[in-house]
Image: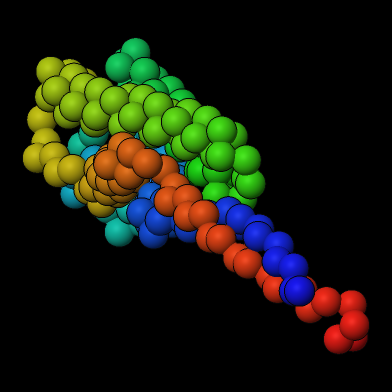
Amino acid sequence: MPTQTTTIETVTVVRPLKIIALVCLFIALVLLIVCLSTTWWLRSGGFRTGLFAECTAATETLQTIPGAPAPGNCQTPHRYSAYIKAVAALLIIAAVLTLFAFVLNIFGLKANDLQRKYFFYKIATYLSLLSVLLELISLVVFPVCFYVEMKNFGYRNWEFDWSYGVAWGGTLFTFGASLLLICDKEHEEVYYKQKTIYNPPPELH
């Protein structure tokens, strides 16, 4: 009489939302690095400034901003108030938190133990939410405080340039990743597949 053996296999299916959240975190990290390392936060004529440097275009002939670098040169800003340093610090911390959230999301995708997966995803969600909060604070404080202290740069027409827009883009991608991690409450879909194996009697071998 043939014998039968029943086994139960656990199949874990990764939801696509986790992959999309990982991509969003990566894009957000790249955008934060770009906005921190560029000098196109504010622009007035041929003069532009970022969080760590200010530059004058080589084609600028009139140097109407006090203390601006010579045409074609850049320098470390000497007129920056505490709020500029605070904005830079908040964005650096946000970038570090985004990096940690990205790495933890990868660990969650690669982990085989469900409890470890849930732990990694949970911490990644908290870190991404905290990063969004820091980014929002910095991007709101920056224009408000600059408007208050605009007299230190001289009377000019100022425009927010693409580096500031890139910072907002990083914030949106981080927020999107946070929403994806929050909405996917079950984290993983686990299926149990039952398989029955029939073994023929020895005399049939």
Farthest residue in the bottom direction? 204
Instruction: Give the percent coordinates (x, y) of residue 75.
Output: 45, 36
Farthest residue in the top direction? 82
Q: Quadrant of the N terminus?
A: bottom right
* Res 103 → quadrant: top right
Residue 27 relative to residue 182: left or right: right
Q: Residue at x 36, y 25 (%)?
A: 130
Residue 7 relative to residue 108: left or right: right
Up-down relation of residue 173 to residue 23 (above or below): above
Residue 202 relative to residue 90: left or right: right
Q: Residue at x 74, y 68 (%)?
A: 3
Report the number of discs: 0
Residue 185 shows in this picture: yes
> Foreground: 91 or 47?
91
Up-down relation of residue 7 to residue 91 (above or below): below
> Foreground: 46 or 83?
83
Instruction: Give the percent coordinates (x, y) of residue 199.
Output: 77, 74
Q: Residue at x 63, y 46 (%)?
A: 112
Up-down relation of residue 22 to residue 98 (above or below): below
Give the colour scheme shown. Answer: rainbow
* Res 4 → quadrant: bottom right
Q: Quadrant of the C terminus?
A: bottom right
Farthest residue in the front direction? 1
Q: Residue at x 60, y 65 (%)?
A: 195
Residue 97 shows in this picture: no
> Foreground: 83 or 108?
108
Instruction: Give the percent coordinates (x, y) of residue 51.
Output: 38, 32
